[in-house]
């Protein structure tokens, strides 16, 4: 379905379903088919020089460190992006993609997510939405399938510590909050930054390793998720929407669930879901005050909402639940393998070279961790990891040419003298 972007000034962009249109070489399809409501062509064209950075960003260690040292806003400024394009398009998109304003986000992370989700291929921007609740539709059947194969989910237990065996230099057991000791041949920490930070503070074994101590320098972002029921049908132009706040302090998305999910298709109420990122100012509020703020923001995107009455709500607060990809954060992030031979990591903040991002990257890093366990214990089957679609031919050619130029530049006198 179509999606839209709202800035603090109103509707800015509507995105079609790109896979239904004639495929053009990247990034022409994204630029030509996207329906900019108020942005002149000169501003749109100001985004094209950014392709030079996209070509240079080939997901290697060297370019990650190169671009991670500056903010996304500095990157757009360096490549001549217009103020209007930045404020009306890039700011809302990155605010909901990286969960923080571009001036607080790494340029490397910005290039990574923009290339993966919208620039590499015309159809990359299209999203497949689950027709029901993800938990009920996907995760509950998956867990039932695992249980039928002998898996045991130890729910309601918090991991407090990892037990280190000096004889094997490995993790021998997991200590839970219920004073339960679970012995393990291998351990995968598939959790967020804030959870690992708490575990490091409690675990003498993890505190003994620099790679885990560096995680304490990372940061997380607060999220508010709300599902709202309005007393009548309200006209919502697009099912999926990305927005930025008037003061640009937080980014948010809202979804028209009557259009996206079968269970609400014939519901007499308008059912909306809104997610607010970098929403620290929301966290201390009670549900009623949060709902008022959400309705106020929604009213700027759909006028009919102001005439509707809120009849029910379900609001959840998730402090420090998302990764903050701030400038300079890359050097503190972990790899999938650790200095403990049987302890592995998974998550959207784990460094790998697959090229995916966000939930897809978390999933892929989980498969990579599972494959490492299979390799370690010598049992099980390796998961097949689908690679990201290859770069288009013209992008491959430009990247090869760019690498040759960079190699030539390194051979020049004083090539490493000036700050890169």
Image: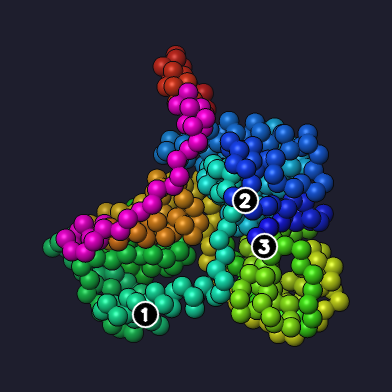
Residue at 55 percent across and 36 percent down: it is: 54
Distance CA(mark 2)–CA(mark 3): 18 Å
Disc 1 packing (10 Å; few <14; some 14–19; many ≥20): few
Disc 3 packing (10 Å; few <14; some 14–19; many ≥20): many
Q: Provide the residue span drawn in magenta.
A: 372-401
Q: Position of residue 271 (x, y in %)?
A: 70, 77
Instruction: Quickly name the residue at label 3.
Output: 240
Q: Position of residue 332 (x, y in %)?
A: 43, 50
Of the two numbered discs 1 and 2 in the rendering, the one whose residue sits closer to the viewer: 2
Left or right of 304 in this view: 248? left
Q: In the displayed structure, would residue 371 be above or below residue 396?
A: below
Q: Earlier in the sequence, mark 1 or mark 2?
A: 2
Query: How many labels, in total?
Result: 3
Q: Position of residue 406 (x, y in %)?
A: 46, 23
Of the two numbered discs 2 and 3 in the rendering, the one whose residue sits closer to the viewer: 2
Disc 2 packing (10 Å; few <14; some 14–19; many ≥20): few
């Amino acid at each position: 379905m179509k999606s839209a972007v709202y800035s603090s000034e109103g509707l800015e962009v509507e995105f079609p379903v790109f896979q239904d249109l004639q495929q053009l070489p990247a990034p022409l399809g994204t630029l030509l088919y996207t329906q900019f409501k108020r942005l002149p062509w000169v501003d749109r064209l100001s985004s094209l020089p950014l392709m030079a950075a996209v070509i240079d960003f080939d997901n290697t260690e060297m370019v990650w460190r190169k671009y991670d040292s500056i903010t996304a806003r500095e990157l757009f400024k360096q490549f001549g992006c217009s103020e209007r394009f930045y404020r009306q398009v890039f700011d809302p998109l990155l605010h909901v993609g990286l969960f923080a304003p571009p001036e607080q986000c790494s340029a490397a992370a910005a290039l990574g997510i923009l290339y993966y989700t919208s620039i590499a291929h015309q159809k990359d921007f299209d999203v497949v939405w689950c027709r029901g609740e993800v938990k009920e539709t996907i995760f509950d059947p998956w867990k039932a399938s695992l249980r039928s194969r002998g898996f045991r989910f130890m729910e309601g237990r918090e991991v407090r510590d990892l037990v280190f065996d000096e004889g094997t230099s490995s993790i021998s057991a997991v200590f839970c909050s219920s004073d339960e000791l679970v012995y393990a041949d291998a351990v995968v920490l598939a959790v967020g930054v804030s959870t690992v930070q708490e575990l490091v503070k409690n675990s003498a074994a993890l505190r003994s390793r620099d790679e885990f101590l560096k995680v304490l320098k990372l940061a997380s972002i607060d999220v508010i998720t709300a599902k709202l029921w309005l007393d009548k049908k309200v006209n919502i132009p697009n099912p999926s929407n990305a927005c930025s706040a008037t003061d640009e302090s937080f980014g948010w998305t809202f979804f028209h669930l009557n259009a996206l999910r079968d269970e609400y298709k014939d519901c007499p109420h308008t059912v909306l879901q809104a997610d607010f990122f970098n929403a620290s100012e929301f966290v201390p509020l009670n549900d009623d005050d949060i709902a008022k703020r959400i309705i106020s923001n929604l009213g700027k995107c759909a006028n009919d909402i102001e005439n509707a009455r809120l009849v029910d709500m379900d609001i959840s607060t998730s402090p420090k639940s998302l990764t903050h990809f701030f400038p300079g954060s890359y050097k503190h992030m972990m790899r999938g393998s650790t200095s403990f031979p049987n302890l592995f990591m998974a998550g959207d903040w784990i460094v790998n070279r697959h090229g995916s991002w966000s939930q897809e990257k978390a999933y892929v890093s989980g498969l990579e961790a599972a494959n490492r366990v299979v390799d370690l214990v010598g049992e099980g089957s390796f998961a097949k990891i689908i690679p990201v679609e290859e770069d288009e031919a013209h992008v491959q050619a430009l990247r090869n040419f760019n690498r040759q130029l960079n190699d030539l530049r390194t051979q020049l006198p004083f090539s490493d003298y000036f700050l890169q």
